[in-house]
Image: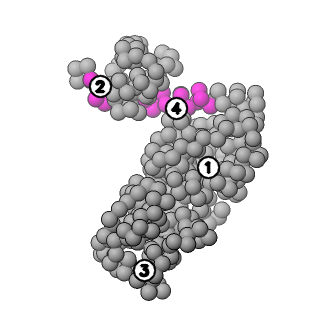
Amino acid sequence: MNLKQLNYISTVVRVGFNISDASESLFTSQPGVSTQIRLLEDELETKIFVRHGKRITGLTAAGEDILRLAEEALVKINAIKQVGSEHHNEKSGTLSIATTHTQARYVLPSVITQFAQQFPSVQLRIHQGSPTQISEMTIQGEADIAIATEAIADYDKLVMLPVYRWNRYVVAKPGHPIFESERLSLEEIGRYPIITYDYAFTGRSSINNAFREASVVPNIVLTAMDSDVIKHYVELGLGIGILAHMALDKDQESKLQSSDVSHLFEDSVTNIGVRKGGYLRGYIYQFISLFAPKLTKEVVNGVVNGKKAPSPDQL
């Protein structure tokens, strides 16, 4: 048994049991991946994968246990490498952040600016995607931390650290009739074409739940992953927008008028997610504390080790 074999089985599962995709991801040949998997199965005297002919279709019961332990081992091995790297040079390296467009565009710039000034030798990498994608990136070690509103809580391989609560604005072209009401209702919003986030993004479930509970069927004509795209199509007059409050910079939104609708929707919570059992270099703790000052190294380690995470209101 060796680390290469453990990495191979983890990669095969991650790419949906496709040997060809796994070999491309691993920069090796398909026969090489298949051979190493069979050698591991022979050594363990058990089948890891379910096969139909030459095609792998899933994990056996034993394979599920082996995969879990293999991934834990890979996380620990990566942590050992990071420990060595940190003690060799404490203030250089890379910090990979997986996050959504809204966080990257509107929330993180000031934090990243401060961090870059404190750690000029650390290379920053920002990966954007849906909450599900960025959670997977962090679990697989492609990112050090995930920053998102939804999905992180659904992954038991991630530790969730709440950062802040937020809610929403309705935006439309100035003078739109929706602004005739000082305090909007869901019924009034539902009368107009709506442009908002894709189902996988930025608190969309809170929007869906609110309309469903009010027995209002919203006329959603366009969804997007990017707050700026939503605003652009609102400017074009295709509909009204429902946006996260942090995506509305009132100093720059001369083309849009807005109305706070936080009374209509449940608050959403932005979280930082880190891998369970993973190792965080010193400067990663510093980045987290710049983003949420009360999430000190002691607090983060406490949550990682099983303590209850503080609520956003405590931060």
Residue 286 in view in this figure:
no
151 or 70, nearer to the observer: 151
According to the image, label 3 marks what residue? 176
Of circles 2 and 3, the one toward us is: 3
- Mark 4 → mark 2, Cα distance in angstroms: 23 Å
The residue segment tinted magenta is 55-79
- Identity of the residue furthest to the left in this view: 53
Q: In which quarter of the image is the C terminus?
A: bottom right
Q: How many labels does the image show?
A: 4
SS for dot 1: helix
Q: Residue at the location (47% across, 47% down)?
A: 129
According to the image, label 4 marks what residue? 72
SS for dot 3: loop
According to the image, label 2 marks what residue? 56
Query: Does 141 sit above or below residue 210?
Result: above
Which of the marked residues, 2 or 1, is nearer the chain's N terminus? 2
284 or 100, nearer to the observer: 100
> Residue 246 location in percent, x, y?
56, 64
Q: What residue type is labelled 4?
A: Glu
Which of the marked residues, 2 or 3, is nearer the chain's N terminus? 2
Q: How crowded is mark 2: few (under 14 residues within 10 Å), some or many (20 or more)?
A: some
Which of the marked residues, 4 or 2, is nearer the chain's N terminus? 2
Q: How crowded is mark 3: few (under 14 residues within 10 Å), some or many (20 or more)?
A: some
> Residue 293 location in percent, x, y?
71, 57
Q: What residue type is labelled 3?
A: His
- Mark 4 → mark 1, Cα distance in angstroms: 18 Å
> Residue 29 location in percent, x, y?
40, 16
> Residue 174 location in percent, x, y?
48, 78
Residue 109 found in image quarter: bottom right
Query: Does 313 sit above or below residue 63?
Result: below
